[in-house]
Each structure stands twice: as C-alpha cells, then as structure tokens.
Image (spheres, coloured by chain):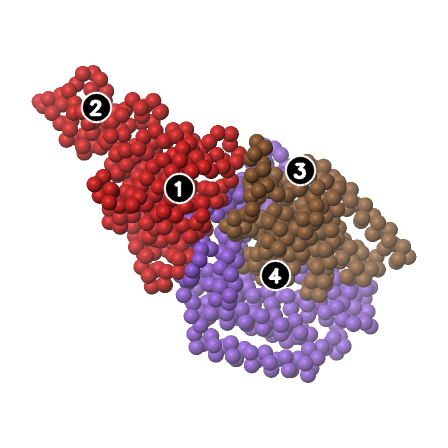
Amino acid sequence: MTATNAAKEPIIRVEGLSFKYATATEKALKEINFTVFPGEYVAILGLSGAGKTTLCLSLNGIIPQMVMGEKEGRCLIKGQDTDEVPVREMAKTVGMVFDNPEYQLTQLTVEGEVALGLENLGIPYEEMLTRIKEALKVVGLEGLEERSPMQLSGGQQQRLAIAAAMAMYPEILVLDEPTTNLDPIGKEEVFEVLQRLNREKGMTIVIAEHEVEVIAEYADRVIILDRGELITNGPPAEVFNDVETISRLGLRTPQVTEFGYRLKKKGHNLPEQLPITLQDAVKKYSGVGGKK
Amino acid sequence: MNNMQLIANYVPGKSFFHRLHPSTKIIWVLGALLTVFFIKDPLIIFAFLVVVLVLIKASNTFATYRASLMLLLPIIFGLIFFQIVAPAFPKPWTPLARLGPFVLYNEGVYSALVLSLRIISVASFALLFIMTTYPGDLFTTMRMWGVPYEISFMVTTTIQLIPILQKEMNIILSAQRSRAMQASGFSALLPSIIPVFAGAIERVRQMSMTLESRAFGSSGKKTSIRQLKMGTLDYTLIILTIIALIGIFYLLWINQGFDRSQQMIFPAPAAIILFLGSIIGFFGILVLFARRIKN
Amino acid sequence: MTTTEAKLVKRPRIPTTYIVALIPVAAALNIVGSTINAALRLPTFLDMIGTAVVAMTLGPWWGALAGLITNIGIAIIRNPVSLPFALCNMVGALVWGYGIRWKMGKSFGRLLILSMFVGFFVSLTAVPIYVLVFGGATGHFGDMLTATFVAMGQRLWVSVFSSNILVSFTDKIISTFVALAILGALPKELTSHLELVEQKNLKTVIWITLGIVVGIAALLFIMFTNIAG
C-alpha cells in the first residue's frame, strides 16, 4: 500500500484538528492529525465519548458549519477546506451514514428515499432508476421500493440509509457506527456491502466502529481515539498486536489475538506477529500444541 | 385513544380519476369551488353533489370518504342552526315560527340548505381529488408549477412526522394515565407537548444533517424520480373545463346565481324539525365522539 | 463560559436545513395538537403552538410558512375544506413574530398582551371565513356561546366574533406559554438571539387565562344585556 500511496495525493487530510462543543467544558477532539488515501478502508475505534462521532461529522463540514463550538486546525477533503465548502456541496464528494437510522429517513417511500440524493445531484431519470435498483440490490432491499421507510425494521432502515448514501457515488463514504441497531446477520450484510464498494468501486471508506473482529477482517487501517486524542494509526495487524495498549484503553483486541497473547504469556512458542482474523489464526496456530 | 389516529386519505387504485394528472384535478376542484360558491339554488348544488357521489363510488373510495365526511358533521349542524335564525340573505326575512328566543325564517331554511350543500359538495369533490392522488405526485406537480423544492419537501416531511408525534404523545399521555393521573384536560396534555417537541428537535437536528449530506439545496440542476406526464386526455379535459366554466359563469351572471330564496316557501314544521334536528345532531355527535374516546 | 456566550451571539445565521427541518416538526405538532384538542374536547384549538415556536425563533414569515404548511397537511390527510384557515394561522405567525422582534417577549406582562393581540388578529381573520363560508358555525363548543349571544338578540357576526375571541384568547395565551416552554428545551443555537422572559409554570398561566377570559365574557354579557334591553 505505502508504495502506491506515495504517488497519490491524500483524499482526506486532517491537520491539528480540535473541537469543543459549545455546551461542553472539555474538548471532544484534541490535535488530531492523519491522512487517508483514495481507495483506503479506514476504521476509527474508540470507546463511546472518545470523539468518533465528532471526527466523522468533521469530515464533511457538519462540524463546524451546523454544530456550534470552537474548532481549531483544518480538515481538507481533496484539498478543499471543510470550513469553506458548504456541507451540501461537499456532499457531492463525501457520503454520510449516521448511527440512528430512523432519523435519516425523510421520504414517503423507499424508492423516494434513495432518489432524494440523486434528485439533488440532478441525475437524469433513466440513470436514477438504474442506480436505485443497483443500490437497493446491494443492500438487499429490492422489492420494497413502494414501502414506507417507517414500516421497515431497524436493520432494513440502516441498510436503506447506506443505499441512499452510496447511490450518490461519493468518492468517500463516512459511516458513524452504522451497525449499532443491527442484529448479527444485518451487521455481516452491511460489512459485506462496504467491502464490495471499497474493492469494486474503489470508494474510500471511513467507518467508526467498535466491533474489532470486523475491523480486523475488512479495514486497511485502524485509527484509535481515546478521550479526543489519536492514540494509534496503522494497519490492523500492527495495531491489534499491541495488546497492552489496547486493553489499557479499555478496548478489546480480536479474540484470536487475545488468545495468542495469553498463550504467549504462558510461554508457548508463537509467531512474533499474532493473527488478527480467524482464517489467519487457523493458519498460524495450526501445529501449536501438536497433533494427535 | 386509538381512534385518534389520523386518516391518511389516499386510496390506491386505477380508476379514471386515479389516472388523471393532478393538474387536471386541481383545475376541476378550483372550478367546482368557484362555481358552487356563486350558485344560490340548492337543487343545482344537490345535483352536483349527486354527480360527485357517483364519481366517488366509481373510484372505489366511498368508505374513506364517509369516514372523512363524518368530521364535517358538527360544523354542518352548527351551520344549519345559525342560518335558520340568522340567514345570509338580505332582509326582509319571512318568519315561519318562534322557539323561545329564536325566530325561524324561511330565508334561513333556504340559506341553511345552500350553505351546507355547498360545503358538503366542495368537500366531497376535494376529497375525491385527495383520495385518488398519490401524495408524492401532488408534490411533483407543485414543483412542476414552480413551487420551490424546499416547500414540497417540508409538506412531505410534515405528513411523515404526524404519526410519529402522535404515537409519542399517546405514549406520554397513557404513561401519565397509568400513574393514576387524569390524562385529560390541559394539565395532562400541555406538559406532554414539551418532551415530544424536544424529542422531535433531536430528530430535526439529525434530519437536517442528513439532508445536507444528501446535497439538499446544493447548486445545479435538479431532477425528479416521479415522472408525471400530461396526456392528451388531460389537455382536452382542461380546455373543455375552461370552456364549460366560461359558459357556467355567463349563465350565473344572467340568472343572478339562480337565487330562488323568494320563490321557495318551506312549511313551518319543516323549519322546526330542521332546527331541532341540528341541535340534537350537534350534541349527539359530541356525545358519540366522547364515547368513542372513552373506549 | 463567557467566551462561549459571546460566540453564541456572534453566530451569523441559522442554517437553511435547520429551517427546512424545524418547520415540518412545528406543522406536524400543530396538526397533532388540533387532533388531540378535538379528541379531548378542550375549549381551545391548539393548532398554532408549532407556528408560535417557529415565528418566535425563525421570524414572522417562516412562522407564516409553518402555518400554511400546517393547513396544506390538514387538507391532505383530513379535509381540504379547512384550507381557508391557513390565513388565520399565517396572521397569527406574523403577529407573534413581529411582536417578539419588537421586544414584546421581554416580560411576562408584555408576552400576555402579545398573545391577546395574536388572538384578536386571528379572530379578525377567522370570523369572516366562519360567517361567509360556514354560516357562523365552527363545529366547536364555542358554537353554544355563539348561540347564546344570538338568543340575546345580537347579529350573527357580532355573536361569532364575541365567542371566537373568547376561545381565541384562551387558545393563544396558552399556546404562547407552551411555545415559551418549548423554546427553553430547544438547542441554544436557535434561541440565543431572543430576548425572552423566563418560562412560567403552565398551571399559573391557565389560571390567569381563565381569569382574563371569564372577565371578558362577563363584560360581553353585561354589554349585550344592556343593548338588548
């Protein structure tokens, strides 16, 4: 990745970003610095209150344009400052999915919901139909076009919100804990959709999430926030191997890593780099403990 | 408190009325409104009402129509009562009977008939339009006519929000009731409005963020998912309607609105029955509503 | 904290999307309020609380828009006959909005006077509609009062105006103070620019309203008895 990134310009550049909500006494974000390159899949990890939502909302300018508070530093999307470009214009580049699905649905039908963004972009009718069909198929809601969004289950509503955001073909898709209200199957579906968007369409994905297993499986990079500060920023294999730091922050590592870490502590001979996904673990742990 | 649910009036279907373009129907409703408000002959208005009722029946919307029309009854009873004793026609009035402090007039009975038929027939025709028009199409038409996108959006959102707010309000009201508080009257209702509104504000905050994130209000050309085309039938009907309206207004002008208040003489007992009936009807409906709410 | 407050005041304008989203909530509250009002048979309308909130926070013309949208919504989901009353809702919004701008919200007394002004102008708009279109009827408990005035020998429009203004005063005073309580629960972004009195206990407001309305009603009865006699 690093070799190709060197040639590319970063699509997101966050420089010294701090933010304090008007009603709060402490800063929600403190001096955050990082960059994201086109096509990357970045996960933001942290406890609730760590600043994940604040960071997500900063990426399309909702902070500081629609939320009151004091902001320092800069957030550049394709070189454009989020202070200066209105959110509604930035929306053409950055798609957003929020954590509460019910509040994101404003139209009378499922179809209308996906169409809203496309109508605002001025997409011609024929193409709109194709995109709606495609988006609903990707999230598994085909056949429900005429249904009222209010009649959908929580999981379906969240997938609809994702469909509405992705149909606009944004270069960057930012998702703030999109699977909080979903059942395990629903979660799995959402992550598969995101992976496909990332791999097939080259969409840059930034997702705030607390399920470490899925982060380990899908993300290219993990950013850990703690009380508004950026703690680590690196590939999941590296980040999750620092088990001490992660547990000090009150977070979890993937269970397979945790498992390896404990075995290692007991003196078992395990590879330097512990596995972070189940598949990886099967490969690396086979042979440990010997065969019958 | 289930009966407090609002009636969503659109009835899906494929009747003749359903297939017309909303613009055509709006022109019809406006035309009917203008015409009926200048006609002073109850028989003509009644004939128009019969036609509307046949159209409603033909569009398979009668059940919805009846439920909606029920809401109009108290005002109709009130209207009959007031018009009989204080007609909307120039004096002198011909007294028919006297009941306590009220004098019942011949012009009053006439005027009660005209005004109530007017309201019922215009309401019926407008309801027919609402019942056969998909709300989304209405908003698309509004935009076609140059109404800003934001306005039609706000109307859509309002309609979406109503059942949600209603549900939240009912939850709070029944919670108060279960705590053995009297869930009726101001003291229960008013405080419940505040958390509902404050909750709705959180919804609004997120909705407004969502809207901006969907490029709502951004620069550039806008398109629409609902494709509505004016057919030949629509154009023909609109032209015919305009010609008919010109004809009708010429006739109305020549005949001074077909005012027959001086020719039509009602028997005194009829006036008394109508007058007492309006009182019984007015209170009857209130009691009926009250009973339905208690259950 | 002082720096935060300075920032609050400096905030140049409320984002359009806030407006686009606040108005539907207000309109929906109006519609739900009027439905519940009808269901509980309260002697008010409660169909303008949302309008009051918008008129006070965003300004008179946005309030008028909320009023218009309220009645379009009612037309679509209930009955189009009530569409002419959009005018009343809009007039109310203008009086509320300009009243607050002209510092009528600074003290309890001023706000009380403002709400009675709203009631007066709304009645002034509503009565011609009631008399010309609906023959003087409202389909509301107020009709009994109108009937009483008619029985006392008053002309129809005088009777309708008299009974309507009593209902209207009750409704607008209560609506104003419920709206004030709602403003207290709104995000600071929307309300920091307003000069408003502290919110009052709603029970007190109801008692004061009752006092005012009973007083005016008594005055009307004395006046009408003398004129008739």
What residue sits 52% from the left and 80% below the top? B240
Kindly report which numbered mark, 1 or 4, lies closer to the viewer in this rendering.
1
Q: Which residue is mark 3?
A: C199
User: Are labels 3 and 1 assigned to the same chain?
Assistant: no
Looking at the rendering, which quadrant does residue C204 occupy?
A: top right
Secondary element under disc 2, as helix, strand or loop, is helix
Task: Name the amino acid type tagged 1.
Answer: Cys
Rendered view: A180 above or below B158: above
What residue sits 23% from the left and 27% below the top? A256
State the mark number for residue C83. Answer: 4
Chain at tag 3: C
Residue B267, image x, y percentages: 76, 71
Looking at the rendering, which quadrant does residue B122 occupy?
A: bottom right
Q: Colour of chain B?
A: purple
Task: Name the amino acid type tagged 3.
Answer: Gln
Q: Furthest-left residue in view? A: A292
The brown chain is C
State the mark number for residue A75. Answer: 1
Which comes sooner in the sequence, label 3 or label 4?
4
User: Are labels 3 and 2 assigned to the same chain?
Assistant: no
Relative to A225, is B179 on the left or the right?
A: right
Rendered view: A255 above or below B237: above
Kindly report which numbered mark, 3 or 1, lies closer to the viewer in this rendering.
1
Q: Colour of chain A?
A: red
Q: Which residue is mark 2?
A: A260
Secondary element under disc 3, as helix, strand or loop, is loop
Kindly report which numbered mark, 3 or 4, lies closer to the viewer in this rendering.
3
